[in-house]
Amino acid sequence: MHLPTTITVEVWLLVLLLLPASSSAHDVNKSPVVCDAEQRIFCPPATSCCPTFKSRREPDVVVGYSCLMGWSSRFPRGPCCPHYEDEIISKKLDVSSWRGGTGCGNGYECGVSSIGTPNCVVNSTAHPTDYDGKQIKNKYDSMPRYRACKSFAKDGVEVFGLPIPLSAALSYKSSSSLTNADELTGHYMGQLAYYSSMGRSIADNRVNSDIKTAIIGVHGSGRDAGTYLCALTSLMVDASKERSFLRGQRRNLNPKDVLVVAPWFMAPVDDSPLPSSSLPYLQWDAQYPIFHTWRYGAESISDVNHNNVTISSFGAMDVLLESLCDRKRFPRLRRVVLVGHSAGGQFVQRWALSSSSWCFGGGQFASRWAKTDLPHVRVVVANPRSFAYLDNRRYFISEQAAGAVDYGMSPAENDGTLTPFDKYQLRPPSASEEDGCKEFNRYEWGLDENEKVPAPYVINNVQKLIDHGDNSDLFCRYASRDIVYLSGQRDVETLGSQICGKGREDGYQGPSRRERSERFFAALQLRGGEVEFCRRETKQVHDRHVVKNVGHDHALIFQSPEGIQAIFG
């Protein structure tokens, strides 16, 4: 979105103060002040502007603003919780370390738990609806609060564009699949839209010597990149309060050293701004051949005015990553973290499996893929609906336990696994099971070629690591990469099947997102025990954590202790 240049507002430095246990019920549930249009333009799209008040004695005097996101851009945001400047000063908190206010989801109100912890409690008299007027059913009596992000300077909520070179589109295709290369004009095919916490820093040629950590947040099916920018910038000061291990060095994190980038994989239906140059914004089809095509690495929509060249969404991500790995522009960058939630989680998992970017280096397979003097790359996969498995095995109930498994178990408060692995076996499907779901191992659920889901980037990068059906090299490369999986403890809703019909759970991956995550992770461990020549430093393949009291919610996942550890730890 483009902002009026005639409006100037000071960017306030705020500090979050968690509400004390002694707050009165009236004070906690005070109706929020609505920011006017002048303030709202300094918040990313699909977020709400929240005020900071002078004091409890002067509750109508507003001294600053922050921005509140919700769990989905499809629903209105909930209330802002009161935030007071005088309490920041009285506690002598460091105002250079910005911490925003807090807020709740739609249908909840600001509250305090019995032990004095600020939370959100369901408002039994509210009847929240989505933007279409459909009623929202809130599932939980209480939830964690959302942490608001700071209001941005004008550049912080603009949409920028990263030029994508033609060479990136040509790198994984044969020339016969493209217009005659001699007829291609110019050096770039378009630009990838993105939001940034530091303006257009990745799209120009200036030297960014202060940036030591870069976070790339990949949005979900709502394509609400602005809320991902807000959610990820909001947690930086929490992370700075803890000791972080960056490239093995124990140090305090300085929020000023961290760049947050939120790419926007646009669709034609999006209300996209005019591009800032002659290069068009790249777009991906939202519905054909399947929904949210960018999440599996689909090709962009061709532009007849720009040579009809297309590029995979994964290829565009390679360009973004490699821009950050350029030591001439980011000489002190130590670490890049790519984090995605839901459809964004699907994106980063499949991209990490298939990418051959030169930015990947080190890890457990260093002798074969390492590059010197590169930032460390971590991938955080949060709450994806499905995974791309590396072979044709899935978890099936064993014959001995067929009559003993309780299929009704999916306790949201269970800290353990939902799959009783002692009663399940990792194996290829039987002939009858495969007949019932012939697509179970086709891409995007496995790695067999899928004519319905064309992905030349994936096929090219994956097939060159598979030798006559042996995918050991592919597995070793994937296992060598630093990947963390996050699952919401409450993300246990039984999902419908996108392939193969009822009861086959999207290719036998499991009934819920949390269970699919634990099964995929368990399968990696078994495969890791079978492949001896990877020369891995540890027997465990990757890492996984369950985020307590959180469901399918990107902001609460990222802002949780487990999320902060995965991103900054």
Image: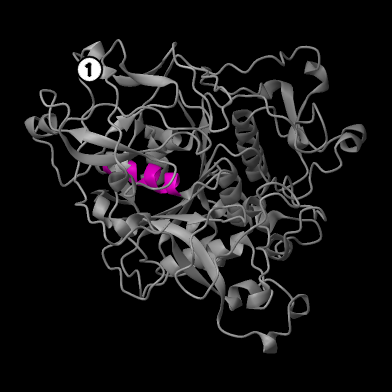
- Image side of residue 373 versus residue 361, left or right: left
Q: Mark 1 — residue?
A: 27
Main SS class of the magenta portion in the image:
helix
Residue 414 vertical position relative to residue 455 in the rendered view, above or below:
above
Q: Residue at x 63, y 51 (%)?
A: 295
- Image side of residue 371 versus residue 168, left or right: left
Question: How far across and how far down the image is residue 195, in percent?
Answer: 42, 56
Stretch of the chain drawn in magenta: 226-237
Mark yes or no: residue 517 visible: yes
Give the camera-side residue of 524 and 95: 95
- Image side of residue 73 versus residue 401, left or right: left
Residue 189 vertical position relative to residue 361 in the rendered view, above or below:
below
**What is the quadrant of the N terminus in the image?**
bottom left
The image quadrant of residue 236 is top left
Residue 498 vertical position relative to residue 390 in the rendered view, above or below:
above
Tell me the amino acid under the disc marked 1.
Asp
Give the camera-side residue of 272 and 28: 272
The image quadrant of residue 294 is bottom right
Q: Residue at x 65, y 33 (%)?
A: 516
Give the camera-side residue of 442 and 484: 442
Question: How far across and how far down the image is residue 259, in percent?
Answer: 34, 56
Q: Residue at x 25, y 55 (%)?
A: 256
Question: How far across and how far down the image is residue 196, in percent?
Answer: 38, 57
Specify whether residue 266 is painted magenta.
Answer: no
- Mark 1 packing: few (<14 Cα in 10 Å), some, or many (20+)? some
